[in-house]
Image: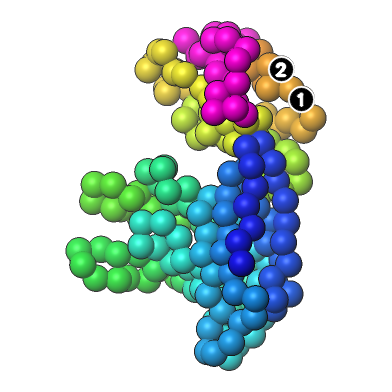
Amino acid sequence: MSFSTGPGVTSSVLLPDSTQVYLNSESTLRYPSAFNGDKREIELEGEAYFAVTKNTGQPFIVSMPHETKIRVLGTSFNVNAYADQEEITTTLIEGKLGFVFRDEQKHKQTILKPYEKLTYHTTGKRQLELQKTDGEVETSWKEGKIIFNNTPFKEAVRMLEKRYAVVFDIKNPKLYRHAFTGTFTNQRVERILEFFRLSSHVHWKYVNMEKFNDERSIIELY
C-alpha cells in the first residue's frame, strides 16, 4: 500500500499494527496490508513523525533513501529523508532508536537516546553529527507550526518550501550566513518573509504569479 501527501499538505495514517504516522509535505509512505513474519518493515521518502506501537518480538524498520534505515521496537521519533536532499535527519523523542547507514561498503548502526538529533550527510565522506535537542523545532510541523531556533537560512528556507508549496530562487549566496529565531502559526509566507527582511535584510519578490509544476509559485530571495 502507498500513502502520499502533496506540496504544502500534511496528513496522517494508521498502520496495521496501530502505529500512528504523520506525513509532512511531499512525502510517500509504503507499507504492507499486514505485518507478518519477524519484522515490521515500511519505506519512507520525505518527512514523517512516528508513534510506534511497541512489539518486542517484531522490530519496526523504516527504509529510507541513500541506503539508510531506522530500527525501533516502540518509540516516538521524527525523520526527514527526502531523496533529493544532501542530509537525512532523525530526532528521537521517546524510546530507543538505531540509525543504520552504509559506510565504506559496510552497514553500521548508531544508537540514539531520547532528545538527540542525528544528521547524516549523504555526500562526500558521509559523516554523522549528533546533538541534543528538545525536539520542538523538528516536530512543530505536525502541529501546524514553524519554529526557528537559530535555524540556518538553508534549513529555514527548506521548511518554508514544504509548508507553503513554494520554490525559492536564491540570488545572493551571502544569505546563507543568516540564521533565524521565531515561532509562526497561521501567518502567510509573505509575513514570514517580511520578518526575514526586517531582521536580516533578506529581500524577496515573486518572480511571477504563474504556478510552477502546476502547484508552486516562485519567490526570489536576494
What is the three-letter code of the residue carrying label 1? Gln
Disc 1 target residue: 187
Q: In this view, does 32 lie above or below 120?
A: below
Disc 2 target residue: 191
- The foreground one among 208 and 178 is 208
Q: Residues within 10 Å of mark 1 (few under 14, many from 20)?
A: few
Tell me residue 88's x, y (percent). Answer: 44, 51
Residue 102 in the figure: left or right of residue 164: left
The residue sitting at 41% across, 43% down in the picture is 84
What is the three-letter code of the residue carrying label 2? Arg
| Magenta residues, start to end | 195-222
Q: Is residue 62 above or below residue 73?
A: above
Tell me residue 125's x, y (percent). Answer: 23, 51
The residue sitting at 60% across, 27% down in the picture is 214
**Residue 160 makes an appearance in the image:** no
As drawn, the residue found furthest toward the front would be 214
Label 2 SS? helix
Tell me residue 201's x, y (percent). Answer: 54, 9
Residue 182 in the figure: left or right of residue 104: right
